[in-house]
Each structure stands twice: as C-alpha cells, then as structure tokens.
C-alpha cells in the first residue's frame, strides 16, 4: 500500500498541468488540475479509495 505522501505526489504529478487553459468563466489560467486523469485510470483511482478505507 502506498503512503499518503506518495499518493499525494502521484496524484499531483498526474493531474497538475501547465500551459494556457481557457476556463469556463473565460479566464485564462497557466495551471490546471485535471482530476479526470485520475478518475479515468483504474489503478490510480483504486489507491485513493484504499487509503480512505483504512481504519
């Protein structure tokens, strides 16, 4: 099982994108956190679920 810090690093490395992103509001952002990248990857989706399930 992964540690909380390792899990956080993995999610951050997977989801934090840099570039030019136009948000729904019309604002432009240079950073974007795309949670869909974790949600759509079963092994990455399983790790947070197991972490939350721990007693």
Image: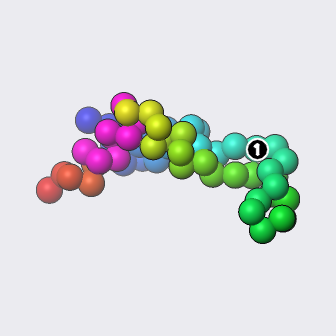
Residue 6 coordinates in the image, percent (x, y): 42, 40
Residue 28 sits in quarter: bottom right
- Residue at left offset 84%, top offset 65%: 27
- Residue at left offset 54%, top offset 49%: 35
Whether the magenta-drawn stretch holds residue 45 is answered as yes
* Residue toward you, 23 or 52: 23
Can you say which quadrant of the picture contains the N terminus?
top left
Residue 12 visible in this rendered orientation of the protein: no
Whether residue 51 sits left or right of residue 28 in the image: it is left
- Residue at left offset 60%, top offset 48%: 34
Residue 47 coordinates in the image, percent (x, y): 33, 40
Residue 36 visible in this rendered orientation of the protein: yes
Q: Which residues are magenta?
A: 43-50
In the rendered image of this protein, does residue 11 appear above or below residue 23? above
Category of crowding for the residue at label 1, using alpha-carbon neighbours closer than 10 angstroms: few (below 14), some (14–19), many (at least 20)? few
What residue would you read off at disc 1? 18
Residue 39 coordinates in the image, percent (x, y): 45, 43
Residue 51 coordinates in the image, percent (x, y): 28, 48
In the rendered image of this protein, does residue 24 appear above or below residue 20? below
Q: Check the image and name the residue furthest to the bottom.
A: 25
């Amino acid at each position: 099982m992964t540690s909380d810090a390792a899990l956080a690093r993995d999610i951050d490395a997977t989801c934090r994108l840099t570039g030019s992103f136009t948000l729904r509001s019309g604002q432009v952002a240079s950073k974007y956190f795309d949670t869909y990248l974790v949600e759509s990857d079963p092994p990455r989706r399983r790790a947070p679920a197991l972490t939350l399930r721990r007693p």
